[in-house]
Structure formats: structure tokens, C-alpha cells
Image (cartoon, rainbow, N blue to C red):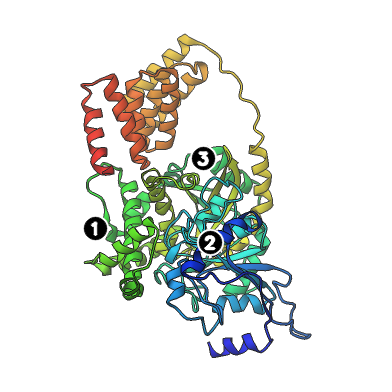
């Protein structure tokens, strides 16, 4: 670190202060008002703006600086020599001195020719997935201005999405880079745990913390990766193997053709890719991560795979809280900082919770990494949705966001707990909301994953454009007699527990007559037996639109939504079924169970 400090001073780095460091007390309030007036200028992305010039280009025969001409921002968690790092909270800034050294990762970027233009807003103390900050203002999501930008690296994502910088640094603990990338329509990279130095980065939870980065261009994403990961220029070519986690895509409401379909088509005509594979990821970890057993919620009737995904999420949050307490308990108790209500809840829970079996948390990390290695080997890429839900509206009530928050963390927990690397890829929009998928590969496979993105990105863009302009659907023929015969065959296949065969018969009936609610409702029941909850929900939606008194459709949709963790919506379905049939025991028991769960 002494060498780093010497190098920062040696090239006589000029610092031109454009903004003013956020002050405290009354000055902080005035600064907040000033920043609100400037939101139209910089989307509220920055805590402070400045200009730190790069190291001079070394003389020939030295290679040209790889990031020359690029600008970047860092969120308020990276240390800069002679600057106070605020950790997203004025009380932290007030009680800490200016840094003596610059973070190792920031120095590496400056050495390679990039220009740092400011510190960005972040979630307080690294908590929160919404990106809101009551002290410095919430950065404006350029893609959806009335909605949250995602966090905790919200300012860094907004700065890139708004075109204010070429790339930005943030940290990712439980999704803090990946979620804002998805909400703002960006590429992002969470490296393998430990692959990028965190010296000079304030810790939230060391076992989960990574330095990550966001960009609009895949070539810039790769160039930054080469710099901070210190990658070899050449790596042996390996045939890539895509593995789709079908159960995780069921958590997302994005139409299949706009997510999985786009990825599949983009890879069809590329060389060097093995046939695609589909798995139930929840069932895979249930067989290979035995330490999760103690974190399963025994009060729900979720299928085994979903139960294990929830358990993994629970273990991740417990580990974060345990390590945050170890890092910051003394400061929280002595300073009693002013925090937003949701952050305060997280912090107080972390400080006041005593974890009885810490060893199990670290055992899960080891087992999950080994589990991922078994699945991915040295050429596998797990394909999952980055997020399950679109960004919530600004200032949404807590009860309206808790379920989407939980689903987001389930998806984030895989890379966070395994330490594997993950890249987030935008896929255009659906109903005005950004769509995003993620690729995860084995720990240490960072270059392999970055190269994959660069290899397939142009093909992917072609497919995105194609699905954005779909051909009109043809009207189905109406042949009532034949469709009824097919329905009865479907019923017989269902009774014989031939679920796939039943789905096929019901589908053929629907092609002939798409106006019968019973066909959709029956197919939904077959989908439930197959664990295809999203498809079941879609069929029930269609059945209810055709027949608003179809009790079975409400019951089946409630079951599907409960399995997808939409507890509030599921409870409403069971309540509606009770209105239609007050004596329905299934609906009564389900509604009672969900009421306890959500309370």
C-alpha cells in the first residue's frame, strides 16, 4: 500500500474539485437542496464530482494504456487519498477522517489511462436493493424515471445508464451491482469472490463482498475486466455449454420468448457451443448442499426445490448480518446514526441477532461452490433471470415490495454464496420495463465468461430486435367436437399421472378452440404437477378472463403464485375462491396459511 501511495503522488495527479463534499448538519440539508436542483443535470447520481487524471502514458516500448480516453465513477465506498469516504451516510462521513491511500482497484484503473470523475450515491452502509437514499436523494433511473434504480450501487448504475461516464465501479454483496444493472438496462460483472482486490473498500460482509463494474458496451466491460482481474490475453478455446435453470425462470413474469427464447436463438448459429441443457436448479442444490437443511422453512408447503432456494437466500442474509455486526457493531452503538427505516431495520437486526451456528453458514458456501463445480465443470454457463420483478415505484410502501425483494435475493444468492462470477445482460424491454438475464460460471472462470459475452453479443442484439417486432398470431380454428374429445383425452392422461401427455392434449384442444376456460384451467393443473408454476399462472389468468366464476382457476392460480412466492396475490386468489364457494376447504386452509405467513 505504501507503493500505491507513492505512485499516486509520483505522476502529480491533478485534482479539480467541481462539486463540494457533502457537509453535515445544516450544511448537509442545504447540500441536499442544491443537489435536487441539479438532478436534471446529472440524474442525482453523484455525491461529489471532481476530476482525477490518469497516470502518464509510459514511454515506448511500453504498451499503450488500455483504458485511455475512458471516464469512470466510483460509488461512495471506495477510498480516495485525501477524501472522506461516506458509505452512503452523513454520520459515517462525519465520524471518519479522510483516507490516507487510494483503493487498489481505483489505482489500477488510473494507471491504465482512465479518468475518474466523481463519487456516486449508494445505499446506506451497503444495504438495500432499491437504491433509495434519504440523505443524498435517490438517483433517477434513466430507463424508468418514476421507479427505483436498484441498489446498493444505484448512483454508479445511473451514471452509466445516463451516459455520464463510460463505466463505473460499485460493490456487490447480495446483488448490489446486478440488481441496478437489471433495473437500468446495463451490462454488469460480479467477479469471482477474491479475484479483485478489496483493499481500500469499506466492508459490509467480507465473505460476500466483491468489487464489480457496469458498462453499456461489452468491449468496455471486457477491457475493465482485463485491468482489474489482471487476465492473460490468450486463453485456450473451450466449447461452451449453456444450462438453463427452468425453475428460476418461473419466478420471472417476462414472456419466455423474450428471455430464454432470445438466448437460445442467439446461440444457435454460433460455433463452439454444445447442445443446451435444462435443469431444476433447486433440486440440484437439494442433493448437493446438505447444510441447507437447517435453514429450510418448515411452515410452508413449497416444493423441495423452491424450499432450498429460499433456504439459500436465508443463509446468505444471515451471513451478511453476522459479518456486518462483527465489522460495525461498535460504531453503530456509539454513533447511533440516522438511517432510513428499512436500513435501520437491517442494521438493528444484524446488531441484535446472535447466530448460534455460524459454522453452518460457511459450510453452505463451501458446499455450494463444489455443487456449482459439479454442474458447470470448466465450460458450463448457468442461465438465470437477473431479477424476478420490474423495479418498484419510488416511495413504494414496504409491504408492496417485500415479496419482490425476497425473490430478487433468491436469484442473487447463487453467485453471492458460491463465490462464482456472474455477468448481467440486458435484453431490451417488456411492457416498458428492462429485461435482464445473467450468466454464471465456475469460480475463477472470469475471462471465460467475459469472452462469452463479447462472442455472442452481436447475435444477441439481432434476436432482441427480432422479438421486438413479432409476427401477428393466426386465429385458431374452432372445431368444438374435436376439441372436446382432446379435452377428455387430456383428462384421462391426467388421471393416469401422464402430466406431459395431458398438457399436449389440452394444448391441442386450445388450438382448436381458445375460448373455453376449462381447457386452460385443466392445463394449468397439469402444469402444477410438472412444477411449471409460471405457465400454470398464465393459463389461470386466461381461464379467469373467459370465466370469472371459475373457482378451480382461482385455486390453481393461488397455488402457482404461492409456489412463485407471490404470497399476497395468492391469498387474494384463495379469498376470491371463498367468495364464490364459501364452504371450499382447500381455499379456507390456504388463505389461513398465507395469512400467518405474511403476518
| Residue under pointer 2 | 32
- Marks 3, 1: nearer the viewer: 3
Are there few (<14), some (14-19), or many (20+) residues within 10 Å of tag 3? many
Q: Where is residue 154? Give x, y as percent.
A: 53, 58
Q: Is residue 101 above or below residue 325?
A: below
The tag earlier along the polypeptide, 3 or 1, is 3
Are there few (<14), some (14-19), or many (20+) residues within 10 Å of tag 2? some
| Residue under pointer 3 | 254
> Quadrant location of residue 237?
bottom right
Instruction: Identify the mark at residue 294; answer none if there is no mark.
Output: 1
Query: Is there a contact, CB below 8 Å, between mark 2 and mark 1?
Result: no
Instruction: Identify the mark at residue 517; answer none if there is no mark.
Output: none
Q: Where is residue 599? Give x, y as percent.
A: 26, 44
- Nearest the viewer among 39 and 176 is 39
Q: Is residue 71 above or below residue 278?
A: below
- Nearest the viewer among 152 and 46 is 46
Q: What is the CA distance from the residue labelled 2 to the residue labelled 3?
A: 37 Å
- Marks 2, 1: nearer the viewer: 2
Q: What is the CA distance from the residue labelled 3 to the residue labelled 1?
A: 33 Å
Amino acid at each position: 500500500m505504501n507503493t500505491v501511495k507513492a505512485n499516486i503522488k509520483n505522476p502529480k495527479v491533478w485534482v479539480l474539485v467541481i462539486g463540494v463534499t457533502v457537509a453535515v448538519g445544516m450544511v448537509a440539508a442545504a447540500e441536499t437542496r442544491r443537489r435536487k436542483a441539479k438532478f436534471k443535470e446529472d440524474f442525482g447520481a453523484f455525491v461529489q464530482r471532481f476530476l482525477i487524471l490518469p497516470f502518464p502514458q509510459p514511454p515506448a516500448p511500453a504498451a499503450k494504456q488500455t483504458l485511455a480516453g475512458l471516464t469512470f465513477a466510483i460509488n461512495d465506498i471506495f477510498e480516495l487519498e485525501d477524501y472522506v469516504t461516506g458509505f452512503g451516510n452523513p454520520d459515517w462521513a462525519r465520524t471518519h477522517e479522510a483516507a490516507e491511500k487510494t483503493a487498489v482497484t481505483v489505482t489500477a484503473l488510473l494507471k491504465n489511462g482512465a479518468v475518474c470523475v466523481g463519487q456516486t450515491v449508494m445505499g446506506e452502509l451497503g444495504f438495500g436493493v432499491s437504491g433509495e437514499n434519504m440523505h443524498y436523494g435517490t438517483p433517477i433511473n434513466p430507463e424508468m424515471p418514476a421507479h427505483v434504480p436498484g441498489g446498493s450501487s444505484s448512483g454508479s448504475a445511473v451514471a452509466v445508464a445516463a451516459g455520464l461516464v463510460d463505466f463505473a465501479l460499485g460493490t456487490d454483496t447480495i446483488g448490489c451491482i446486478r440488481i441496478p444493472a437489471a433495473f437500468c438496462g446495463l451490462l454488469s460483472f460480479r467477479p469471482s469472490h477474491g479475484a479483485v482486490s478489496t483493499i481500500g473498500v469499506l466492508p459490509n460482509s467480507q465473505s460476500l463482498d466483491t468489487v464489480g463494474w457496469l458498462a453499456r458496451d461489452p468491449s468496455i466491460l471486457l477491457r475493465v475486466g482485463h485491468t482489474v482481474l489482471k487476465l492473460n490475453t490468450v486463453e485456450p478455446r473451450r466449447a461452451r455449454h449453456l444450462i438453463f435453470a427452468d425453475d428460476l425462470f418461473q419466478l420471472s413474469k417476462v414472456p419466455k420468448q423474450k428471455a430464454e427464447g432470445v438466448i437460445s436463438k442467439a446461440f444457435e448459429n454460433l460455433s463452439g457451443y454444445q447442445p443446451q441443457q435444462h435443469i431444476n436448479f433447486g433440486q440440484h442444490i437439494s442433493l448437493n448442499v446438505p447444510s441447507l437443511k437447517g435453514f429450510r422453512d418448515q411452515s410452508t408447503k413449497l416444493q423441495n426445490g423452491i424450499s432450498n432456494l429460499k433456504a439459500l437466500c436465508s443463509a446468505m442474509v444471515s451471513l451478511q448480518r453476522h459479518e456486518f455486526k462483527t465489522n460495525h457493531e461498535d460504531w453503530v452503538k456509539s454513533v447511533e446514526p440516522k438511517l432510513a427505516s428499512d436500513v435501520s431495520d437491517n442494521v438493528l437486526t444484524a446488531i441484535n441477532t446472535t447466530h448460534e451456528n455460524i459454522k453452518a453458514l460457511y459450510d453452505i458456501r463451501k458446499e455450494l461452490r463444489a455443487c456449482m463445480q459439479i454442474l458447470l465443470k470448466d465450460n458450463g454457463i448457468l442461465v438465470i433471470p437477473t431479477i424476478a420483478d420490474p423495479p418498484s415505484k419510488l416511495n413504494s410502501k414496504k409491504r408492496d415490495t417485500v415479496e419482490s425483494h425476497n425473490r430478487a435475493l433468491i436469484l442473487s444468492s447463487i453467485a453471492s454464496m458460491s463465490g462464482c462470477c456472474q455477468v448481467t445482460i440486458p435484453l431490451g424491454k417488456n411492457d416498458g420495463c428492462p429485461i435482464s438475464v445473467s450468466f454464471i460460471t465456475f469460480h475463477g472462470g472470469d475471462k471465460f465468461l467475459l469472452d462469452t459475452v463479447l462472442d455472442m453479443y452481436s447475435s444477441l442484439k439481432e434476436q432482441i430486435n427480432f422479438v421486438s417486432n413479432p409476427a401477428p398470431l393466426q386465429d385458431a380454428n374452432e372445431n368444438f367436437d374435436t376439441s372436446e374429445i382432446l379435452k377428455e383425452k387430456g383428462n384421462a392422461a391426467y388421471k393416469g399421472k401422464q402430466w406431459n401427455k395431458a398438457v399436449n392434449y389440452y394444448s391441442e384442444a386450445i388450438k382448436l378452440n381458445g375460448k373455453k376456460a376449462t381447457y386452460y384451467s385443466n392445463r394449468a393443473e397439469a402444469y402444477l404437477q410438472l412444477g411449471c408454476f409460471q405457465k400454470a399462472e398464465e393459463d389461470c389468468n386466461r381461464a379467469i378472463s373467459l370465466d370469472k366464476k371459475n373457482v378451480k382457476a382461482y385455486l390453481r392460480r393461488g397455488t402457482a403464485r404461492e409456489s412463485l412466492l407471490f404470497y399476497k396475490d395468492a391469498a387474494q386468489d384463495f379469498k376470491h375462491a371463498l367468495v364464490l364457494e364459501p364452504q371450499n376447504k382447500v381455499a379456507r386452509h390456504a388463505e389461513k396459511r398465507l395469512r400467518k405467513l405474511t403476518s
